C-alpha cells in the first residue's frame, strides 16, 4: 500500500453551476451540494434576471426560473443565501449586463446581516464584451457596458477587496467556435480593453493599479484536444505575465499571475450515447489540472446529460465526484509541474503564443476589441471558425464517437427512466415568482424606491460610480427590472452585428458526393415551381442569447441558395410573426435553447394565426426533449431538430421538403 | 404560392388601399411571383392600384451609398422623424445575392438595423435580394415600390451602391440620397467617375469623426455643383451623425423640400411616368431582348405609346407583350 504524500497541494475550488425555479428551491440545492463536499457556490440566474427584466415583464414569459434562479429583489437574494454564511462562502455569479446590480444586492444583503463587505469573496462574471459575441445577455451599448465593468472594479478594489469583479471569458468564445489562438487573442484583448478603461477612469492612483491588475481573473474553456488545451493555458499564463509587465508596469510577479476558473466544454457533449460525455468531461478536466503552473483555481463541470436538458441533482453530484476523484484519489497534487522541460509542449505553447500575438496585433490595428466587435469582424471570424468545425464533423474529418462514427449502441439503462433522465423545472415557478414580486412591490416604501431610482439615473448620466446608488436601490427594495430600465433610459439598448455575412466557402463545391450542389438544385427548382426564390426566416424568440445554432442554419441556408432573413436574438413572438408576414417567407425556423420552447413556440404560432398565416410552416430547433418534441408536432410544428441532428445538409434537404409539402409539391427525400 | 392560391386582384387591391398589412404582404409576394398565371394576376393588381395617385401623391425616396457608410442607421433615423410626424413608411431594403454558381442565396439583414421600435403598425419593411440582375436593382423593385406608394406616405428604397445601382435607383425614386463614407478618397473618385449627377441630396455620415467628415463634405460640395441639372435645386451636402442625431433635422427637411420642389416645378408627374415607362421597357427587353423591342416598334415608339396612356400603362404593357409574343411566334413559323 502506498501512502499519499503529506505536503500535497491544495485542490482547486469545486463548484457546480446551478440554480433553478426559485430562490427557495435553489437554496435547498446549494445546501445539499455543500454538504456533499462542494467548496464554493456557482449561481446560475434565469434569463430575465440576466437581461434586466422583472418576472412579470411580457419578455420574461416562459423564461422565469428556467435556466437559473430568478432574483427580482433583495428578499429573493436573502432567501437564496438563507443559512449560508456570506463571510465564509466563496460565491461565483454568472452575471454580466446586470452584474453591478446583483453585486449590489449581495453587498446590500451582507450589510443587512451586519457582515463587513471586506470579508466577502467571490466572483461576478461581468464580462459584457463577450456577450456581444456569444451567449447574448447584453443590454447596453459597448461604451456604457465598459463603464459598468470599470465601475464595479473601481468599487470592489476599494470596498470589497477579496472580490473578483470581472472574470474575462474565453469560455464562450470557444462555444461560439473559437480556435485556441482566437480564444487567447480575444480574451487578452478584452483584458487590455478593461484595464485601459479602468486606468482612463482616473479613479485609481498609479501606485494602486497593480492591485487592480491582480483582481482581473479569467474564465476559460477546455475541449477534447486536451494536450493542446493544456498548452493553451500555459500560453495564457506566459502572455498575461508579459502583457501586464510591459503594458501596465506591474513589477511584482505574483500580481501578474494568470488566475482562472474553468467550465469544461459543453459544445462537444453529445445527445447520442450521452454516457460517453463522462469520459469527455474527465479528459477535458485533465487539461486544466495537469500542469501545476497553469492549473485552474476553480472548476465546475457540466453534467453528462447537458445536451439533453437540465441536469438533476444526481447528475450534478456525479460531476462533483469526478473532481473529487481527480483531486483526492490520484497523485496529481503531489508533484511540481510535470510538463516543464518538455520540448514538445514548449514548441506547441510557442506556436499558440505566436499565433495569438499576430491576431492581437491585427485587432489592435483595427482600433481594439470594441471597434472590431462593432465592425462585425470578430463575430464573422467566430461564425466562420464554427462553420469549419461543423463542416469537418459532417465530412467525418473530425470524429465524434456515437455521432458520426460508431453509432451502434445497446439500449441505455441511464436514459430509460420515466423522467427522461433530465430535470423538470417547477411549472408553477413563474406564477409563484410573479406573485412574490407583486407582493414585494406592495410592501415596500414607494418614496424610498423613487428616490433611490432617481439617484441611480443621475449617477448613470454623470460619471459617478454606479455601485453606491445601486446598493441604495438594493436596500430600498428596487427590482431587477426597475434597475435595468433606469439604465436603459440613460444608456439606450444595443444590437451587435450578427456576423453571418461571411463569404461562401467554395471548398464545398469540391466535395465528392457534392450534396451542396444537389441542395442548390433543389432550392432553385422548388423556387421556380413556387414562382419565387425560397425565403426563410430564422428567428430566436425569448431572452436566450445562444445564437450559434441559428447563425449556422442561416449561413448554411444562404450557401445553398435560400434568401435568409435573420434579425438576431431576443425577439418577441409578435416581432417574429410580423417579420414573417412583412417578408413573405416560405418557412419560419425557430431556435430556442433556454428550455422555454413550449411557451414560445405556442406564442409564435398564435401570432402567425392572428395574421392569417396559419398555413406558414414552422420548424423548431434546440435542446428539446422527445416528449416536448411530440407535443410541438401536435401543436402544428412541422419538424423538430435537436443536437443529434448535426448534419446541416440533411436539415436543409428536410426544410425544402417541408416547404414542398406545405405547397402541394412532392417531397424530394434524402440527399444522395 | 401555387396556382390555386392566387389572390383575387380586385379584392387584394382594395385591401392594400385600406392599408391592411396582410394584403400589402400578399401583394408584394404576388409581384415577386414569376409563374405565368401570377404575372397576369400581378398586372391586373397593378392596373387596379394605378391612378393619379401614382403620379402625384406620396414620396419615393432612394438611399444608396457604399457598404459600411451607415445607410441603415441613417434610414432608421429618417424613419423616426417621419413617424414622429405621423407619416406611414414602407421600406424596400435590397441586399446583394451571391453569384448563381454559388447558389444565388442571400442574407437579408437590414430589418434589424432599420427597425426603431419593437412594434409599429405604421412601418412596413420588406427585404429583397438583388438576384444578380445586371448588377443593378432587381426588376421587382419597381412594381413593389408602386404598391407601397398606394398605401404608405413615404416609400424608402435602400440599396448598396455599386455603380449600376445608383443609375437604377434614379430611375425609381423621386429623390435620391447618396450616403458617403467620411475620410474615404475613394468615394470622391467613385462619384466623379460618372454618378455624381445622380443624387439630389448628399449625406456624409459619422460627422462625429470631425475633420475627415468635413473634408469629404467639402470635396463633394466642390464636385457636385451642377448648374446644368435642375435649376433651382441646390443639391445639399449634409454632415450628419446617425449615432448622435447631429444634423438630422436639417437633413430630414431636405427630403420634403425636394419633393415640394419637384411638384412646384411640375416635374413630379412626368418623372414618375418616365420611371414607369423605363420599367416596362426594361421588362420587355429582359424577356425578349432588343429584337423584341424592335418588333413592338422600337424603344421610342414604345415610350411614346406609354406616355399617351399615362395611368393605363400596365394594360398597355400586357398588350405590347402579347403583340411581341404573337410576332415572335409568326416569325418563327417555318416559311415553306
Image (cartoon, coloured by chain):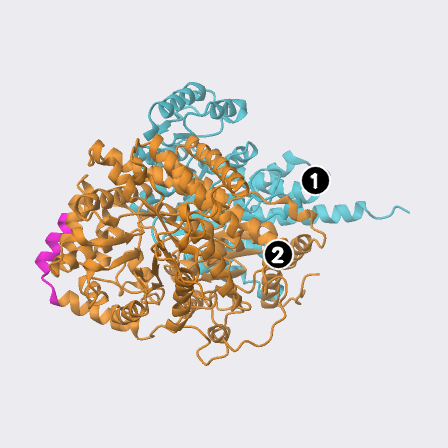
Q: In the figure, what tint was chain B given?
A: cyan
**Chief SS of the magenta region:** helix
Q: Quadrant of residue B281?
A: top right
Judge depth for marks 1 and 2 and give the one in front: 2
Q: Looking at the colours in the rendered structure, which chain would you say is drawn in orange?
A: A
Quick one: SS at disc 2? helix
Quarter location, residue B293: top right
Can residue A562 be seen here? The reply is: no
Q: Which residue is mark 2?
A: A394
Q: Which residues are magenta?
A: A443-455
Q: Secondary structure at mark 1?
A: helix
Give neighbour class at mark 1: few <14, some 14-19, many 20+ (Cα, 10 Å): few
| Observer-nearest of B275 and B176 | B176
Q: Which residue is mark 1?
A: B289
Residue that protrudes farthest toward the top in the picture:
B222
Task: Please indicate whether residue B154 sits to the left or right of residue A403 in the image.
Answer: left
Amino acid at each position: 500500500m502506498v501512502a499519499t504524500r503529506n505536503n500535497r497541494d491544495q485542490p482547486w475550488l469545486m463548484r457546480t453551476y446551478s440554480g433553478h425555479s426559485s430562490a427557495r428551491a435553489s437554496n435547498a440545492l446549494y445546501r445539499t451540494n455543500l454538504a456533499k463536499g462542494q467548496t464554493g457556490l456557482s449561481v446560475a440566474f434565469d434569463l430575465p434576471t440576466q437581461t434586466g427584466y422583472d418576472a412579470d415583464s411580457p419578455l420574461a414569459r416562459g423564461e422565469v426560473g428556467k435556466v437559473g434562479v430568478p432574483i427580482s429583489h433583495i428578499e429573493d437574494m436573502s432567501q437564496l443565501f438563507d443559512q449560508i454564511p456570506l463571510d465564509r462562502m466563496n460565491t461565483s455569479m454568472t452575471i454580466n449586463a446586470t452584474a453591478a446590480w446583483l453585486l449590489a444586492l449581495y453587498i446590500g444583503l451582507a450589510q443587512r446581516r451586519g457582515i463587513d463587505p471586506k470579508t466577502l469573496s467571490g466572483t461576478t462574471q461581468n464580462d459584457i464584451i463577450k456577450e456581444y459575441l456569444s451567449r447574448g445577455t447584453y443590454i447596453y451599448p459597448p461604451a456604457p457596458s465598459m463603464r459598468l465593468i470599470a465601475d464595479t472594479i473601481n468599487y470592489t478594489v476599494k470596498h470589497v477587496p477579496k472580490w473578483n469583479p470581472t472574470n474575462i471569458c474565453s469560455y464562450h468564445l470557444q462555444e461560439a467556435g473559437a480556435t485556441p489562438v482566437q480564444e487567447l487573442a480575444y480574451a487578452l484583448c478584452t483584458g487590455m480593453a478593461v484595464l485601459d478603461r479602468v486606468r482612463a477612469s482616473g479613479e485609481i492612483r498609479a501606485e494602486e493599479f497593480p492591485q487592480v491588475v491582480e483582481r482581473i481573473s479569467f474564465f476559460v474553456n477546455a475541449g477534447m484536444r486536451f494536450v493542446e488545451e493544456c498548452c493553451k493555458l500555459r500560453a495564457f499564463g506566459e502572455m498575461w505575465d508579459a502583457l501586464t509587465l510591459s503594458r501596465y508596469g506591474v513589477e511584482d510577479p505574483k500580481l501578474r499571475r494568470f488566475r482562472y476558473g474553468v467550465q469544461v466544454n459543453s459544445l462537444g457533449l453529445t445527445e447520442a450515447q450521452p454516457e460517453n460525455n463522462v469520459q469527455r468531461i474527465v479528459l477535458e478536466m485533465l487539461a486544466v489540472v495537469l500542469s501545476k503552473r497553469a492549473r485552474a483555481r476553480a472548476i465546475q463541470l457540466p453534467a453528462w446529460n447537458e445536451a439533453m436538458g437540465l441536469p438533476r441533482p444526481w447528475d450534478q453530484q456525479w460531476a462533483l465526484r469526478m473532481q473529487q476523484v481527480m483531486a483526492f484519489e490520484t497523485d496529481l497534487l503531489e508533484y511540481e509541474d510535470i510538463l516543464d522541460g518538455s520540448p514538445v509542449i514548449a514548441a506547441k505553447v510557442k506556436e499558440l503564443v505566436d499565433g495569438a500575438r499576430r491576431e492581437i496585433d491585427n485587432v489592435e490595428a483595427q482600433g481594439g476589441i470594441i471597434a472590431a466587435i462593432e465592425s462585425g469582424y470578430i463575430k464573422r471570424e467566430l461564425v466562420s471558425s464554427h462553420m469549419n468545425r461543423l463542416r469537418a464533423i459532417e465530412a467525418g474529418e473530425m470524429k465524434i464517437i456515437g455521432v458520426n462514427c460508431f453509432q451502434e449502441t445497446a439500449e441505455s439503462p441511464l436514459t430509460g427512466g420515466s423522467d427522461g433522465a433530465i430535470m423538470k423545472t417547477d411549472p408553477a415557478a413563474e406564477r409563484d415568482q410573479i406573485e412574490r414580486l407583486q407582493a414585494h412591490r406592495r410592501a415596500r416604501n414607494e418614496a424610498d424606491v423613487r428616490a433611490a431610482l432617481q439617484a441611480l439615473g443621475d449617477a448613470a448620466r454623470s460619471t459617478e460610480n454606479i455601485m453606491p446608488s445601486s446598493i441604495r436601490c438594493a436596500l430600498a427594495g428596487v427590482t431587477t427590472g426597475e434597475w435595468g430600465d433606469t439604465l436603459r433610459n440613460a444608456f439606450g439598448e444595443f444590437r451587435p452585428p450578427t456576423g453571418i455575412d461571411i463569404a461562401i466557402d467554395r471548398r464545398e463545391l469540391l466535395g465528392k458526393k457534392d450534396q451542396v450542389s444537389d441542395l442548390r438544385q433543389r432550392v432553385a427548382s422548388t423556387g421556380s415551381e413556387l414562382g419565387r426564390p425560397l425565403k426563410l426566416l430564422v428567428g430566436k424568440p425569448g431572452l436566450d442569447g445562444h445564437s450559434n445554432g441559428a447563425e449556422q442554419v442561416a449561413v448554411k441556408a444562404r450557401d445553398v441558395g435560400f434568401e435568409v432573413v435573420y434579425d438576431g436574438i431576443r425577439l418577441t413572438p409578435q416581432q417574429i410573426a410580423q417579420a414573417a408576414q412583412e417578408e413573405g417567407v416560405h418557412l419560419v425556423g425557430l431556435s430556442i435553447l433556454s428550455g422555454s420552447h413550449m411557451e414560445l413556440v405556442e406564442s409564435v404560432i398564435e401570432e402567425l394565426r392572428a395574421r392569417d398565416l396559419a398555413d406558414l410552416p414552422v420548424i423548431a430547433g434546440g435542446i428539446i426533449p422527445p416528449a416536448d418534441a411530440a407535443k410541438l408536432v401536435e401543436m402544428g410544428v412541422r419538424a423538430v431538430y435537436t443536437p443529434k441532428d448535426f448534419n446541416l445538409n440533411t436539415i436543409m434537404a428536410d426544410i425544402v421538403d417541408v416547404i414542398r409539402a406545405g405547397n402541394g409539391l412532392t417531397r424530394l427525400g434524402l440527399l444522395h | 404560392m401555387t396556382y390555386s392560391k392566387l389572390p383575387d386582384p380586385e379584392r387584394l387591391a382594395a385591401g392594400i388601399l385600406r392599408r391592411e398589412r396582410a394584403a400589402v404582404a400578399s401583394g408584394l409576394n404576388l409581384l415577386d411571383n414569376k409563374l405565368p398565371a401570377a404575372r397576369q394576376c400581378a398586372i391586373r393588381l397593378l392596373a387596379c392600384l394605378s391612378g393619379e395617385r401614382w403620379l402625384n401623391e406620396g414620396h419615393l425616396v432612394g438611399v444608396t451609398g457604399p457598404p459600411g457608410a451607415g445607410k441603415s442607421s441613417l434610414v432608421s433615423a429618417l424613419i423616426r422623424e417621419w413617424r414622429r410626424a405621423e407619416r406611414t413608411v414602407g421600406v424596400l431594403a435590397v441586399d446583394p445575392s451571391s453569384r448563381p454558381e454559388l447558389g444565388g442565396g442571400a442574407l437579408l439583414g437590414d430589418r434589424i438595423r432599420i427597425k426603431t421600435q419593437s412594434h409599429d403598425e405604421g412601418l412596413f419593411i420588406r427585404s429583397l435580394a438583388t438576384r444578380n440582375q445586371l448588377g443593378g436593382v432587381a426588376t421587382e423593385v419597381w412594381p413593389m415600390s408602386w404598391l407601397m406608394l398606394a398605401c404608405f406616405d413615404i416609400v424608402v428604397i435602400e440599396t448598396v451602391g455599386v455603380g449600376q445601382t445608383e443609375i437604377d435607383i434614379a430611375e425609381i425614386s423621386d429623390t435620391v440620397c447618396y450616403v458617403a463614407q467620411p475620410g474615404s478618397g475613394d468615394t470622391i473618385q467613385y462619384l466623379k467617375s460618372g454618378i455624381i449627377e445622380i443624387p439630389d441630396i448628399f449625406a456624409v455620415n459619422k460627422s462625429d469623426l470631425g475633420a475627415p467628415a468635413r473634408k469629404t463634405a467639402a470635396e463633394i460640395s466642390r464636385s457636385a455643383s451642377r448648374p446644368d441639372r435642375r435649376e433651382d435645386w441646390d443639391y445639399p451636402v449634409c454632415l450628419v451623425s446617425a449615432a448622435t442625431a447631429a444634423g438630422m433635422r436639417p437633413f430630414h427637411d431636405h427630403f420634403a423640400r425636394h419633393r415640394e420642389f419637384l411638384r412646384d416645378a411640375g416635374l413630379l408627374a412626368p418623372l414618375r411616368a418616365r420611371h414607369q415607362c423605363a420599367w416596362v421597357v426594361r421588362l420587355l427587353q429582359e424577356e425578349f431582348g432588343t429584337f423584341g423591342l424592335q418588333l413592338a416598334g422600337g424603344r421610342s415608339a414604345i415610350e411614346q405609346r406609354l406616355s399617351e396612356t399615362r395611368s393605363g400603362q400596365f394594360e398597355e404593357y400586357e398588350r405590347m407583350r402579347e403583340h411581341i409574343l404573337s410576332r415572335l411566334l409568326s416569325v418563327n413559323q417555318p416559311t415553306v
